[in-house]
Amino acid sequence: MTDKLIALVDGSTYSRSVCEYAGWIAGRTGAPVELLHVLGRRETASSDLSGSIALGARTALLEELSTLDEQRARLAQKRGRAILEDAEVVLKQAGVETVSARLRNGDLLEAVAEAEVDARGIVIGKRGEAADFAKLHLGSNMERIARASKKPVFVAARTFRPVRKVLIAYDGGQSAMKAVDHVARSPLFAGLDIRLLMAGTESVEGRRALEGAQATLKAGGHEAAAELVPGQPDKVISETVERDGIDLLVMGAYGHSRIRSLFIGSTTTEMIRSCKIPVLLFR
């Protein structure tokens, strides 16, 4: 399946939103969706307790432990398939025609790296199962994937809402320029309200970079408003998202700006943590 969209589902409260946003992207781009659920090594690994078992009872207990491990692994597989089946129903309801599902064992990062080779992007929830109830705590897997992936990563918010207004947080860096170029070319953004925001000190270099990004978007058919606002990027972006009712934030992922004192990698983490909307990241 070429040029697919990978949707990572894990049974957390974010899984439905991941599927709904994947459905929205697929509906506007025609991309097929591959659902991916990865069983971690702890879910399928055996526990070696033989060293703490008395010699006389060892054989019987090892057999029992082995049986329990097998049952645990089968249960994890069954649960994984159920998660994928539920996700497939959500995507079908969203009108996605081509959906496939893959259940993998092993390391999540390795599974994603393998799957993204022929993919156009990845959709993942802000937090996974283990982090659901930790307020404003980002899932470590989400951050690992966002930092490692070579493809755009769409970080879904907890609840889906239709996307109409898009804000591009622009810093003039390579990843931000890649984001602007993608928005200009992709059918995903056709007809949407696109805005450019640069945060930092007013300068000739900054203004020139912002105008260049605006020209790229205009060449792609978007009449995007552009604004350079003094202040700390995380504060400026958060306030703009809240004030203007932005539905999707687009930005570079964990990259340093070529324009001094505008962005640092931690801004990415802060935006994902604090904004209650999805964030589309580019490396």
Image (cartoon, helix red, strand yellow):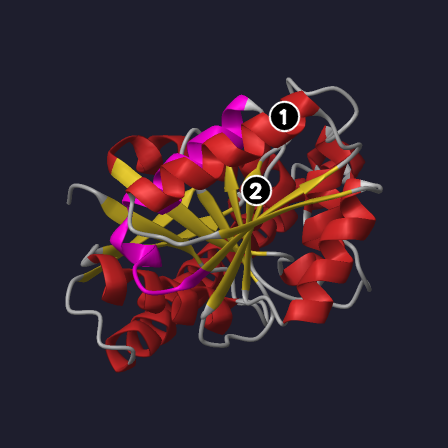
Point out residue 120 in the picture as x, y percentages from the top left corner: 30, 41
Label 2 Cα crowd, 10 Å radius (few <14 / some 14-19 / many 20+):
many
Instruction: Using the image, determine if residue 26 lies above or below residue 69.
Output: below
Instruction: Using the image, determine if residue 107 lies above or below residue 39.
Output: above
Which of the 4 image quarters holds residue 41?
top right
Is residue 5 rendered magenta in the image? no
Say which residue appears at 16% left-offset and 41% top-offset: 2
Which of the 4 image quarters holds residue 231?
top right
Magenta range: 174-193
Mark 2 to mark 1 CA distance (whole Å): 10 Å
198 left or right of 83? right
Say which residue appears at 35% left-offset and 57% top-offset: 189
Say which residue appears at 30% left-offset and 72% top-offset: 91
Overall secondary structure of the magenta section: helix
Say which residue appears at 34% left-offset and 31% top-offset: 114
Give amino acid for label 2: Met
Is the N terminus in the top left, top right, bottom left or bottom right quadrant? Answer: top left
Residue 110 visible in the displayed image? no
Of residue 226 and residue 175, the one placed in the foreground of this image is 226
196 left or right of 222? right
Q: Which residue is mark 1?
A: 255
Of residue 18 and residue 65, the one placed in the foreground of this image is 18
Q: Which mark is residue 223?
A: none
Give amino acid for label 1: Gly
Of residue 169 and residue 130, the one placed in the foreground of this image is 169
Point out residue 84 in the picture as x, y percentages from the top left corner: 36, 65
Q: Which mark is residue 251?
A: 2
- Residue that sits furthest to the bottom in the current view: 93
Of residue 280 and residue 61, the one placed in the foreground of this image is 280
Circle 2 SS class: strand
Instruction: Using the image, determine if residue 133 lies above or below residue 111.
Output: below
